[in-house]
Amino acid sequence: MSTTPTDPALVNPQKARKGLNRLWHATGYSINGLRAGWGEAAFRMEATMAVVMVPLAFWLGRNWVEVALLAGSVVIVMVVELLNTAVEAAIDRIGPEWHDLSKRAKDMGSAAVLLASLLAGGIWLAALWQRFFVA
């Protein structure tokens, strides 16, 4: 095994882990990511809404496909929000000065959250319409 500073196992110990040990550590990193996401107001709002909407999906959905679409659309919004936050954090690490490419990256992340939210809203409106206005 190479001992050069560019060896991935020396730079990142996770690269050298295998099997359940790797999975155990990866789970810890994921939990840390959720904790970091909780520091964002938008993610907290979406997570709070998910606590209400995911159980509601089981009441509103008439079969497993509808429940999966309703609950999944809520989770997708949270996933996209975490990815948007990750993009923003990476851009902010580079530097605080304004740059067109940084702005574009942040704007595209924000647009992704908007599209995911519109998708979830459309799925929920269609399910509500089906449940209450269609015989």
Image (tube, grey):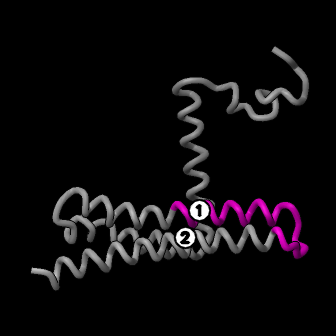
Verify whether residue 88 appears in magenta.
yes
In the rendered image, residue 99 lying in the magenta stretch gets the answer yes
Location of the C terminus (image quadrant): bottom left
Q: Which residues are magenta?
A: 79-101
Query: Of all residues shown, which one is farthest toward the top?
Result: 1
- Contact? badges 1 and 2 (CB < 8 Å): yes
Q: Kindly state the secondary structure of the residue where label 2 is placed.
A: helix
Residue 50 lies in quadrant: bottom left
Q: Residue at x 41, y 72 (%)?
A: 120
* Image quarter in which the N terminus is found: top right
**Which amino acid is tagged 1?**
Leu
Q: Which residue is mark 1?
A: 82
Q: Residue 128: x and y, percent?
A: 24, 79
Name the foreground residue: 122 vs 25.
122
- x, y (%) of residue 2? 85, 17
The picture places residue 63, in percent across and down from the top left corner, at: 18, 60
Q: CA distance from mark 1 to mark 2?
A: 7 Å
How far from the left and from the top, in percent, is residue 116? 49, 69
Mark 1 is surrounded, within 10 Å at the Cα level, by few (under 14), some (14 to 19) or many (20 or more) other residues, namely many
Q: Secondary structure at mark 1?
A: helix
